[in-house]
Amino acid sequence: MIKVEIDEGSGFCFGVVTAIHKAEEELAKGETLYCLGDIVHNSREVERLKAMGLITINRDEFRQLRNAKVLLRAHGEPPETYQIAHKNNIEIIDATCPVVLRLQKRIKQEFRKEDFEEKQIVIYGKNGHAEVLGLVGQTGGQAIVIESAEEAKKLDFTKSIRLFSQTTKSLDEFQEIVEYIKLHISPDATFEYYDTICRQVANRMPNLREFAATHDLIFFVSGKKSSNGEMLFEECLKVNANSHLIDNEKEIDPTLLRNVKSIGVCGATSTPKWLMEKIHDHIQLLIKD
């Protein structure tokens, strides 16, 4: 008998849960609601909310909008978005995650601080990611984004550095970047770093590694756009080479189910529980066949 188990710790983080609840509440009123960008980096959940009436728009469409209601998702937005909303009489339903809001505030304060040294505000994050765009926006576009410890080498170590991190990045790599800067920064420059990684995300790693290691086969469920999903899937692979990234049940290769005794289903902070349950049930049917 093959055991199929869903990881209890996987699924939406509180920031995403709040954004989805706000969307559902507004849609229940029967009014037209727009969302700036995908509410969550999971196409299945986006489709579910679309069926309820949520209209996803891009930045260009947002600029053209007038007298409407727009939801801002958990990732947060740059100041420009709020300025456009004010000008175009757009009512904002702000679902920015409180962890992201605090980070935006800290970056803005650091950027505006009147200190008399030349400094670089550096953000460890994924270029072009929705959250990172909101963070860079706090500095009028002047912050430097680095995606890896390798990219830290391109910084100017003769100038002071203030390092922040996208909330869903790897804690280990952040520490690596900190150590590298400490070693290379000029004695005349100052270095301050702020560990702004969300613990709800970071704390999932040890549990996820343990879960992945205790099964013969892992199906990691995540949208292809999710940077958090990408990172957590890598963690699964480190401990279990028989880990597979899937977006939905149709991507399951039935031949993988041969000669295994236990199968684990887990996912990202942007993966809905209902989708993992659907995949779990689909695997049970495949096993019976």
Image: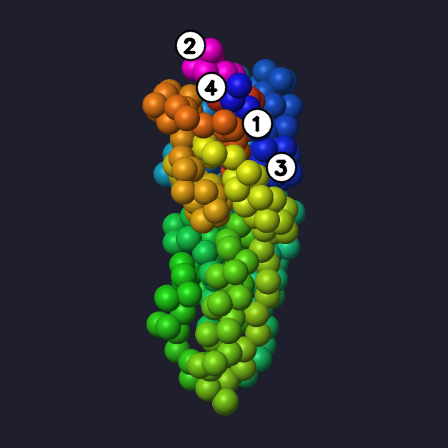
What separation in Å lies between label 3 and label 2 (alpha carbons)?
29 Å
Label 2 element class:
loop
Q: Circle 4: is it few (<14), some (14-19), or many (20+) Cα within 10 Å? A: some
Span colored in magenta? 281-289
What separation in Å lies between label 4 and label 1 (alpha carbons)?
10 Å
Can residue 255 be seen here? The reply is: yes
Q: Amino acid at mark 1?
A: Glu
Q: Circle 2: is it few (<14), some (14-19), or many (20+) Cα within 10 Å? A: few
What separation in Å lies between label 3 and label 1 (alpha carbons)?
12 Å
The answer to whether the residue labelled 4 contacts the one labelled 1, judged by CB atoms less than 8 Å apart, is no
Residue 58 x, y percent position in the rendering: 40, 36
- The label shown at residue 289 is 2
The answer to whether the residue labelled 2 contacts the one labelled 4, judged by CB atoms less than 8 Å apart, is no
What separation in Å lies between label 2 and label 4 (alpha carbons)?
10 Å
Residue under label 1, please give it. 5
Residue 16 in magenta? Answer: no
- Relative horizontal placement of residue 57, taking residue 215 as reference (left or right): left
N-term mark: 1 or 2? 1
Q: Specify the principal SS of the magenta part.
A: helix
Nearest the viewer among 102 and 221 is 221
N-term mark: 3 or 2? 3
- The label shown at residue 9 is 3
What separation in Å lies between label 1 and label 2 (alpha carbons)?
19 Å
Q: Amino acid at mark 4?
A: Ile
Mark whose residue sits in front, 3 or 1:
1
The answer to whether the residue labelled 1 contacts the one labelled 2, judged by CB atoms less than 8 Å apart, is no
Which residue is drawn at the image coordinates 51% and 55% (left, top)? Answer: 170
- The label shown at residue 283 is 4
When the figure is inspected, residue 171 is found, relative to residue 59, above or below; the finding is below
Q: Amino acid at mark 3?
A: Gly
When the figure is inspected, residue 72 is found, relative to residue 119, above or below; the finding is above
